[in-house]
Amino acid sequence: MALIASSKVIPKKNTITVLDGVRGFACLLVIFYHVNTFTRVKHIWSFNDVGNIVSAITLVGSYGVTLFFVLSGFLLFLPYAKAMIFQEPWPSMRTFYIRRICRIWPGYYFALFFLIIFAAPIYLHIDHWPQLAFFLTFLMDSSSHTYQAINGPFWTLAVEWQYYMLLPFIALGMRWFVSRSDDKWRVPTLFTCLLAMILWGLTTRAWGHSWDINPQQQLWVPSYVHSAIRFVIYGQSGKYLEDFAIGMIICSCYLLTQRRPELTMSLLIKRYSWCIWLSGVICFCFMTFWYITPLYSALVPYIGAHNWLCELGFSISFGLCILGVLFGPPVITWLWESAPLCKMGMLSYGLYIWHEPALFWLMDNVFQHFVSWSAGARYGLYWLCVFGLLVPLCYLFYRCIELPGVKLGAYYTRSKKAMQPVKDTATREAVTMQP
């Protein structure tokens, strides 16, 4: 009971705001990957031109998606972790779902129908309605016919949405175990549940990937049952539960460090935050460059692209960096708190959705008129369009589509007490600031 009774919030700046910068960095990583991929396809550069090290850097941006998953695990698990560790009120499932719907649906469905009408009208034909149904229900990551179709980044929204739908029930399952533990075992029990979630993610990834490599292996159940199981628990590239679980573990460490600063773990995290951050950077560099080392043949079955430990390696790297940034000195945090990166984080949803179709359109209609330019100038033109055209358009998208949805979700989930008029100025300000 001491863990709960003596827990307290230490007044300090809101360190969660640095995660806006981290989100912006994740978005830039993904855009960096696609710009490099498209410019290579257009023969602006090649792997032979830049060498192994630069080639590895150009490819690692694809794991910005992993960072998004880790961030989602961290942020969405916060209220559940508070409830389980400190016995705060259990979060409302209705509130959670309404806010997720109002945050994701407006931007996604607007982009989906816009792209179907102007770029993929074939999905309006009756013979493509079954595939369209997968997009309408966020299942497009589970079928080979819809995976990365219409808009490449859409498949990750399916993974995110499925995690949103499962999280309240996953948390309830963890709560069942945690609530039956003695007070001193509440936190270890929670971490055990999260480790079990990682194990499930790794097991399903290894199983699903084995069928990608050898689809002719013996079935132990009827083929239709096997296909249904694979559809649900693996899809086309996994459900990435190990990534979300790493974020949930970092979330729990963050809460304990904030509310129980006298714990040995809290003291170590704060004292050695720069070491934690540096460990994450070293791990990230290893995951980026390992395949150009003599260790390639030994490690490729484990951390090669899409193999069962690859995602875990990157998610641990990002998790350590996030924990280090949250409690690190200004020399570490200044970049993530910078206004430009935080603004990119604010626009990250729109940028993530629109950057690929926008780049495709520019390649087909604009960039072809500049083939006489030097390779460096043509490469720079891509980034000029990203920051000069795409960012302003995504700001309009945020103001006109995303923000009204967020406000609508806040309105429908506001407590009755918060909606009542109040006369006291301080109370009125507090009510207004409620999310």
Image: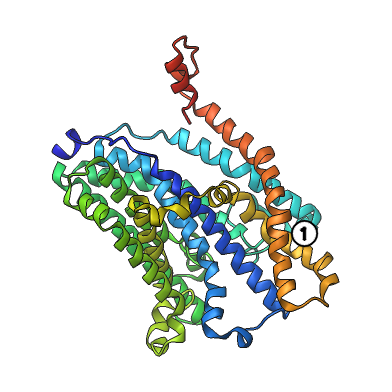
Q: Where is 72 relative to 412, above or below?
A: below
User: What amino acid is labelled 1 in the image?
Assistant: Ala
Callout count: 1
Q: Which residue is mark 1?
A: 120
Q: Horizontally, is 31 left or right of 269 in the view?
A: right
Tell me the element at label 1: loop
Q: Residue at x 79, y 52 (%)?
A: 117
The quarter of the picture where the N terminus appears is top left
Q: Horizontally, is 176 left or right of 390 in the view?
A: left
- Please identify the quarter of the rendering in which residue 80 is found: top left
Res. 357 in view: no
- Please identify the quarter of the rendering in which residue 139 is found: bottom right
Q: Residues within 10 Å of mark 1 (few under 14, many from 20)?
A: some
Residue 233: x and y in percent read 46, 61
Res. 81 in view: yes
Residue 326: x and y in percent read 36, 50
Q: Residue at x 26, y 43 (%)?
A: 176
